[in-house]
Image (cartoon, rainbow, N blue to C red):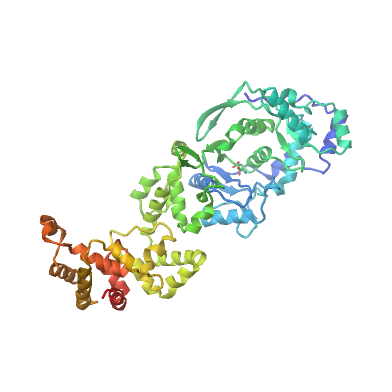
Amino acid sequence: MIGIPQNKNMGQSENMVKIVERLFSESLFLPSEIEKKYPPRELKANAMVTRIAPSPTGFMHIGGLYTALISERFAHQTDGFFYIRIEDTDRKREVAGASSLLVKSLSYYGINTDEGQTLSGEEIGMYGPYSQSKRAEIYKAYIKDLVVKDLAYPCFSTLEELEEMYSIQEAEKVRPGYYGQWAKWRNKPDQEVLRALDEGKSFVIRFQSNGNCSNKVFFKDVLRGGRELPENDQDVVIMKSDGLPTYHLAHVVDDHLMGTTHVIRGDEWLSSTPLHLQLFQALNWDPPHYGHISPIQKIEGVSKRKLSKRKDSEASVSYYDEQGYPKDAVIEYLLNLANSNFEDWRKINPDKNNREFTLTFAKLANSSGALFDFDKLNNISKELIARYSVDDIYSKGLDWAKKYDLEFSKIFEQNPDYTKGILGIERSGQTNVRKDIAKWSDLKHETEYFFDRLFHLTTEGIIESLLGINTNDIKTTVKDFIESYREDDSKDQWFEKIKEISIEHGYAGNIKIFKEDPKKYKGYVADIAKIFRVLLTGRVNTPDLYSIMHIMGKDRVLKRLSVIK
Ligand code: GLU
């Protein structure tokens, strides 16, 4: 049972009326009037109403996107509603323009909000305003009601006094906080409160808890199952000295009025859930279901830790755009992190929209302590890009380059047909599509040797790559190849010629023959192909060499091969 103080002061004393008037001098709506403006939602059975409630600090953590995605999917897969509420009551932390950035990010990632701030900056929805700073009067009305009902009270303790209290608690080795005997202003005589008000002292409003921390509160977390936590006995601040509420009170009021059915949030809030349930009870409302998500972690040394805003660039949502991960890859990676069966679903349904995948709380519960895994992200992204058309890769890659690598973008778009030809190698009309691009920033590395301005071959590079191949063979095979090269040869004809050149120079025509008697040969056909590959691309590993030569065109091929004389 959650401890709620009994209403000991129903028959309001004259002083109490004075105190309430002084604390809340403005005229406020009555809670009953407010309730009328927020009628219960008409929902289908089992429809969920969820929300994302970011604080506009100017930074979007990947964990925030993860929570938003999960919340949005649960709402929409049950025909419910998902909305964004800006939690901007901490004016000190607020960064100008941050809420627009959040809205933009959600929209970019296809996390569709039904209510709240939109891209134009305006709000939509019947349950607003959706920014807490615009709801100050609403919170005040409820805070006032709690004071009137003797469930909250003003506290005039200064910061210094509180510090002193904490040091005494530390010295006495007792639990820190404002509770029980330490709650100095809880039972102050009205006269003293009035005097403090007369003196113009700054105050906060505290919730008056009569919980007992040796009792346990039981609640069912939709992700973690039944939880038992100590009852809250702290008289927590619900209204700060600037008249704005704290998160505890504000989210309770908002989630009630806005008809949230499921609050999915970070597990840093798990330990305050007993307080939140207590507040719901004090206000006579049914609480929503709570689900606490564990943060995305990473391995450092032998231990795991939360992705840190300061230490890990991948903690920021902007990182994925900078690197050029397609937004769907990020979303599918997060879906996979949330429900590990997503990966199998994707294999079975390669062409379906990922919205057709149904997220479950049960699987999400198993994903607790999800580890950030770049290999997984890259694989998901490579698979996804492998399904894109050449035109899509071209335009998405170019968009990225224009934003993050202008110089490369100019080269990339100089001759669109040439670039598309490059991108089409082992892609167009093929069943075994190449999967070498995980992000648009890989494009440069994967294509640069095709562009003369980016291709730099050094003698050292050639020597190193062709180590073990006789220098004279390099010269003479190249000479023979140049002489025999016909651009319109089929792949078979082309390969036959390379084979012939190999045999003529003492190399086996295929690996099988070579292996039968390695001593008889200097090597085999792949070594000769490697000579041409290195001279044309500067690399020992590339996609199909025949296609590369075709796309490069005869002039470029012969020119590059001719560096060997
Ligand atoms: N503003 C809170 C935060 O950013 C929201 C928590 C919640 O979703 O209720 O942590």
Closer to us: 223 or 37 = 223
Name above or below for residue 141 compared with residue 317.
Answer: above
Q: How far across and down, in percent of the image, does residue 213 sit?
A: 64, 23
- Give the number of callouts: 0
Q: Quadrant of ligand 1?
A: top right
Residue that appears at 51% across and 54% down? 319
In the rendered image, which quarter contains the N terminus? top right
Q: Is residue 170 visible?
A: yes
In the rendered image, which quarter contains the C terminus? bottom left
Q: How far across and down, in percent of the image, does residue 147 sit?
A: 77, 33
Q: Is residue 429 visible?
A: no
Residue that appears at 55% across and 48% down? 61
- Left or right: 537 with respect to 276? left
Q: How far across and down, in percent of the image, does residue 7 sit?
A: 75, 25
- Left or right: 40 with respect to 383? right
Name above or below for residue 30 compared with residue 124.
Answer: above
